């Protein structure tokens, strides 16, 4: 079994394809290139080999493909959008309840973050497809089991007796856990999925005693990691490794933070360790999902005044900490949202491709896409002022320490499109994504800024499904873009 980090070390796939060509929005000119005619044969598994088939999703694929004039874009959409259902889900009934285990793709483990993000784009279709609704409820049930096993872990096995290759990490490892990296977003995503499912269906049957127990544990864990007593709390993590971002300094608790109401995240959504413990995009995500918990447990059938009071108090504290510490004065750009802070006045200015990121905040509902503070922050992270923003012959976008220098994540280009209100920018992002698939028919974790054929992770379902979500979003809000065959 490979971890993401080990998989990266072993993966540098070179496959035939054209170098990516950018539009003028990205500063490069594509007029001199001619694309050969291609036969776009589906890359989906044969029907009998697919893990799950949704009639509603299949109908949407047919419908949206008819809106897409560019044949390669239509091909990518058909391959990518159902990739999670086609290849990564394992559905069954356990103790009379649906249970769905979701792997990331090339790693047989279920991340709370990835499993939510992979399933999320199908939420709009659950009301018209009872089978799909049961699959999603199964993910929600499985996530609750994982949280109850260990709220500090980020990734789990289907078999809770299985031991991890990371079993010797210096933390409280136990069977069933693939990796135990504490990331705020790991506990935010399951709430987002459950709330999204309820909002789409009105079904409250999933909010049973076990799920509620998991939600209470989320609140408890968030409180512990506010570290209001100035101590590290019950969680620490160390690993014997040469990868600096897999280790945590000072006995596994990280560098000191000043208690201010914000929640410490020892690791980022990339599974890389934070420099300063208060990871602001993840704290903003926490504020959003605490609102979801308040909404759910204010429903007459689920009313729990004590839980609501705890969630409100916590949300108020995080919001206060954000206002006082998370908004900083950039020497060049003025007021922006910081990436990480420590409560002592220090801040770390960068952005990472993984979600939550500063770029992705409107996608998560944490801020409006037209908010001046967000737009100012966006200018910074999509420029050379972000040390992990790269521009090369193959394209431009945000990467991160996880895949090393000069690597761009297609996910960042997708989120740039989804969060944009500029039609020209959206079109440029889609064009870039078409040209960076390296003729594979899928998205990848990352590609080299100068050569799309140097990419990591051939099978990364989150990136694929997210790309499909972007096309669905575009078909609703900017259908005229998809009508352009020269995109």
Image (tube, grey):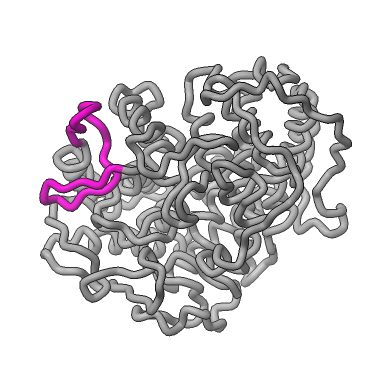
Q: Residue furthest front?
A: 32
Residue 44 x/y as whole percent? 80, 49
Q: Quadrant of the N terminus?
A: bottom right
Visible residue check, residue 472: no
Q: In the rendered structure, does residue 343 fall within the stretch colored magenta? A: yes
User: In this rendering, is residue 401 above or below 292?
Assistant: below
Residue 106 x/y as whole percent? 65, 63
Q: Please name the residue shown 32% across and 31% down the image.
A: 377
Disc tally is 0
Residue 78 x/y as whole percent? 76, 39
Visible residue check, residue 343: yes
Q: Nearer the viewer, residue 132 or 71?
A: 71
The answer to whether 150 appears left or right of 333 in the picture is: right
Q: Quadrant of the C terminus?
A: top right
Q: Nearer the viewer, residue 220 or 109?
A: 109
Bounds of the magenta span? 328-349
The answer to whether 130 appears left or right of 50 in the picture is: left
Q: Please name the residue shown 48% across and 68% down the image.
A: 146
User: In this rendering, is residue 328 above or below 47?
Assistant: above
Tell me which corner region of the image, top left, top right, bottom left or bottom right, holds residue 98. bottom right
Residue 352 x/y as whole percent? 41, 46
């Amino acid at each position: 079994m490979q971890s993401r980090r080990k998989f990266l070390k072993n993966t540098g796939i070179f496959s035939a394809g054209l170098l990516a060509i950018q539009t003028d929005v990205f500063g490069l000119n594509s007029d001199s290139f001619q694309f050969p005619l291609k036969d776009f044969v589906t890359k989906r598994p044969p029907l009998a080999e697919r893990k799950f088939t949704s009639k509603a999703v299949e109908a949407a694929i047919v419908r949206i493909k008819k809106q897409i004039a560019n044949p390669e874009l239509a091909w990518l959409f058909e391959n990518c959008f159902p990739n999670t259902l086609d290849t990564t889900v394992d559905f069954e009934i356990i103790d009379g309840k649906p249970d769905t285990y979701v792997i990331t793709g090339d790693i047989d483990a279920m991340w709370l973050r990835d499993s939510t993000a992979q399933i999320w784009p199908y939420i709009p279709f659950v009301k018209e497809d009872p089978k799909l609704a049961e699959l999603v409820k199964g993910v929600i049930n499985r996530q609750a089991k994982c949280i109850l096993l260990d709220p500090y872990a980020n990734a789990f096995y289907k078999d809770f007796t299985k031991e991890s290759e990371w079993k010797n990490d210096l933390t409280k490892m136990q069977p069933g856990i693939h990796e135990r990296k504490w990331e705020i977003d790991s506990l935010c995503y399951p709430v987002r999925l459950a709330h999204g499912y309820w909002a789409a269906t009105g079904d409250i049957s999933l909010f049973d005693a076990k799920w509620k127990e998991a939600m209470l544990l989320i609140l408890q864990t968030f409180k512990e990691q506010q570290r209001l007593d100035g101590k590290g709390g019950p969680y620490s993590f160390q690993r014997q490794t040469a990868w600096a971002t897999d280790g945590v300094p000072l006995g596994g608790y990280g560098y000191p933070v000043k208690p201010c109401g914000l929640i410490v995240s020892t690791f980022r959504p990339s599974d890389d360790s934070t420099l300063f413990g208060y990871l602001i995009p993840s704290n903003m995500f926490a504020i959003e999902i605490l609102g979801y918990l308040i909404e759910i447990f204010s429903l007459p059938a689920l009313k729990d005044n004590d839980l609501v009071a705890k969630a409100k108090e916590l949300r108020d504290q995080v919001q206060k900490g954000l206002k006082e510490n998370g908004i900083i004065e950039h020497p060049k750009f003025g007021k922006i949202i910081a990436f990480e802070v420590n409560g002592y006045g220090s801040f770390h200015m960068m952005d990472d491709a993984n979600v939550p990121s500063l770029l992705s905040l409107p996608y998560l509902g944490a801020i409006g896409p037209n908010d001046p503070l967000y737009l100012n922050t966006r200018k910074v992270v999509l420029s050379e002022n972000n040390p992990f923003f790269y521009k090369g012959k193959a394209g431009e976008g945000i990467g991160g320490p996880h895949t090393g220098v000069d690597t761009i994540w297609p996910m960042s280009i997708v989120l740039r499109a989804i969060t944009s209100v500029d039609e020209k920018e959206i079109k440029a992002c889609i064009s870039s994504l078409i040209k960076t698939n390296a003729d594979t028919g899928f998205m990848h974790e990352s590609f080299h800024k100068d050569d799309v054929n140097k990419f990591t992770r051939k099978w990364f379902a989150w990136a694929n499904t997210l790309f499909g979500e972007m096309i669905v979003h575009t078909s609703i809000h900017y259908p005229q873009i998809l009508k352009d065959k020269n995109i």
